[in-house]
Image (cartoon, rainbow, N blue to C red):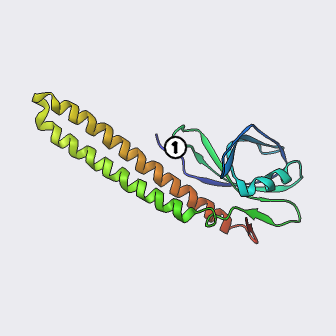
Amino acid sequence: MSLKPWQPQVVHDQLLEVGTSKSDVDATKFNYLEFRDAGRVRNVTVFADLLTKLRAAQGVECCSFHLVSGQHVQRGDVATVLVAVGRPNEPTFGIDMKARGSQDTVAHIEKARKMGKLMHWGGIAMIIIGIPLIPVFVGILIIGGGVILRRTGKNMVRGMQYQLDMLEQCSATLKRIPGVRLV
């Protein structure tokens, strides 16, 4: 599966409706946000710090919503992150990535990426070791395990890189908003 690159989007519109949601400590995931002109944006994650700002913007004309959209790594469907919200004649409020622990998240993602690379290369080693053992039948099992390990490691590396790209795109989007106030 080829992952679509993360894309920033700014919607200047009226938020009419928010879909059903699932909440955890850090964020609320809405099935959709419905805008008057822009239509429906699906699978939107709103960090807890911005949730009150989003609710305050609902029904208000000409608000700005700064979104970053990409693709959910496991499900393959559209995934969107709300990065900032602004109401007319008020400041735009954005998520403070550093306060949310983005540096720790990046460190964990890097560790997982390294583990994925080890799995990838370990799988290749298993395939190479299994080739001469094919006549003993055990080689087929080793090769099969190596193929699975290699594929899992490769997908893990790709998924972790995709998460890093999302964090970078969120930070870049915030830097482009003049006078943004981080919450």
- Work out which residue is located at the far bottom of the displayed protein and give it: 179
Residue 74 placed where, x, y %?
Answer: 51, 40
Identity, as a three-letter code, of the amino acid under mark 1: Val
Residue found 54% across the figure and 37% down from its top: 75
Q: Quadrant of residue 173?
A: bottom right
Residue 169 placed where, x, y %?
Answer: 59, 60
Residue 32 placed where, x, y %?
Answer: 73, 40
Seen from the viewer's position, the closer of residues 70 and 31 is 31
Compared with residue 42, is residue 105 higher up or lower down, i.e. above or below? below
> Which residue position holds label 1?
73
Residue found 72% across the figure and 58% down from its top: 49
Residue 180 placed where, x, y %?
Answer: 75, 68
Q: Secondary structure at mark 1?
A: loop
- Work out which residue is located at the far front of the displayed protein and give it: 25
- Residue 39 in the figure: left or right of residue 77: right
Q: Around disc 1, counting alpha carbons within 10 Å, would you say few (fewer than 14), some (14 to 19), or many (20 or more)? A: many
Compared with residue 89, is residue 133 higher up or lower down, i.e. above or below? above
- Residue 87 in the figure: left or right of residue 80: right
Q: How many marks?
A: 1
Residue 64 appearing in the image: yes
Residue 40 appearing in the image: no
Compared with residue 180, is residue 132 higher up or lower down, i.e. above or below? above
Quarter of the image with the C terminus is: bottom right
Residue found 67% across the figure and 50% down from its top: 27
